[in-house]
Image (tube, grey):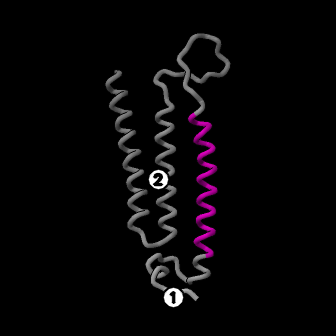
Amino acid sequence: MLSQAIYMSNILYFLTLLILTSGLFIMLTSDNYVRKIIGLSIMQSSVLIFYLILGKVRGGVVPIGDDALHIYSSPLPQVLMLTAIVVGFATLSLGLSLIYCISQRFATISEHKINFSEID
């Protein structure tokens, strides 16, 4: 039973790494700034999943309202990830607003076209 739990956690770590690399691939290969922001959000989601997987204790219970001796799961990773979600949303909002300003200034959101255009 223990080996099955270890096997399952290894699969979850692998899937998290797969999500992280897909977000990195989107960021590195995309020419569109909106796609780059989406890749950044995918990478952030994989980091959140990774920390939540690390915070789970096998057989752990919630440490609220129980005086018996148990193995407790720490609520700290969940609290930190809620904060990270808010920061990620703020980063996404700021990035999209900057992309809007870029599109107003250059009439495109293509990185290649902006890099090789003449600035007024």
If the image is split into quadrants, where does the C terminus sit? bottom right
Numbered disc in front, either 1 or 2: 1
In magenta, the rendered stretch is 77-101
Instruction: In this rendered view, identify the residue nearer to me: 9 or 36.
Output: 36
**Distance between the alpha carbons at the discs numbered 1 and 2:** 33 Å
The type of residue carrying mark 2 is Met
Q: Position of residue 101 (x, y in %)?
A: 62, 75
Residue at horizontal 52 percent and vertical 68 percent from the top = 34
If the image is split into quadrants, where does the N terminus sit? top left
| Secondary structure mostly taken by the magenta-highlighted segment of the chain | helix
Q: Position of residue 58 (x, y in %)?
A: 46, 24
Q: Is residue 84 inside the magenta stretch?
A: yes
Vertical placement of residue 11 versus 41, above or below:
above
Is 87 left or right of 9, judged from the image as shown?
right
Residue density around tag 1, few if under 14, some if 14–19, many if 20 or more, within 10 Å = few
Vertical placement of residue 106 versus 97, above or below:
below
Is 53 left or right of 25, judged from the image as shown?
right
* Residue located beneath label 2 in the image: 43
Residue at horizontal 59 percent and vertical 46 percent from the top = 84
Residue at horizontal 52 percent and vertical 63 percent from the top = 37
Vertical placement of residue 115 versus 25, above or below:
below
The image's mark for residue 118 is: 1
- Name, please, the residue furthest toward the top: 68
Q: Position of residue 51 (x, y in %)?
A: 50, 38
Q: Secondary structure at mark 2?
A: helix
